[in-house]
Amino acid sequence: MTETRADNVTWLTQEAYDRLKSELDHLSGPGRIEIAQKIEAAREEGDLRENGGYHAAKEEQGKIEGRILQLQGILENARVGEAPRTEGVVGPGMTVTVVFEGDDEEVTFLLASREEVGAPIDVYSPKSPLGAAINGKKVGDKATYALPNGRSMTVEILDATPYGG
């Protein structure tokens, strides 16, 4: 089975894309300048082996560079707008209601990128074990996925509707 380009696509709203792009622009511009200044100021304090400020600034620099790489990857594979959706079929951008086997309680969540913060309901990634198991399934279908403890869980899809915001 070959992986298609569509597997790597992250669907984002315009607001989420703009927010992530703004964060990337800040971190790769003024953010890098600020941390370089902190490192330089700490370096001037003397012996680097015993300089806590220097080591803290270098650690912060590593976190900033890691976040820059993460944001570049997300934005590189991002598509802005609505993911193609079909009522009753689970996919990114859908509000999904499931019931876990052995439990009568229904759980409703948005299947979308974790970068879609601010949604009034829980957000599950399509790349999570549950998200991957239910992606493409129809209302009434069951899906089984592996839990972190090695056991498996089965869910039944009760509803899948386009997210309204």
Image (spheres, grey):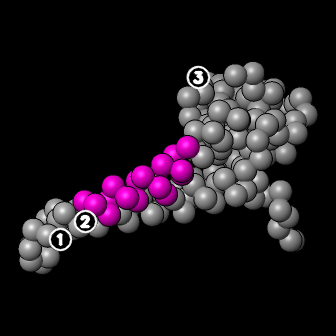
Q: Which of the numbered marks, if any, corresponds to residue 96?
A: none
Mark 3 / mark 1, whichever is N-terminal: 1
Mark 3 / mark 2, whichever is N-terminal: 2
Q: Residues within 10 Å of mark 2 (few under 14, many from 20)?
A: some
Q: Is residue 63 left or right of residue 70?
A: left
- Give the residue at x 58% y 23%: 120
Q: Nearer the viewer, mark 3 or mark 2?
A: 2
Tell me the element at label 2.
helix
The x and y percentages for residue 93 are 76, 35
Residue behind mark 2: 39
Q: Is residue 6 left or right of residue 106?
A: right
| Above or below: residue 46 compared with residue 13 | below
Contact between labelled residues 2 and 1, with CB atoms less than 8 Å apart: yes
- Give the residue at x 82% y 40%: 83
Residue behind mark 1: 43
Q: Which of the numbered marks, if any, corresponds to residue 120?
A: 3
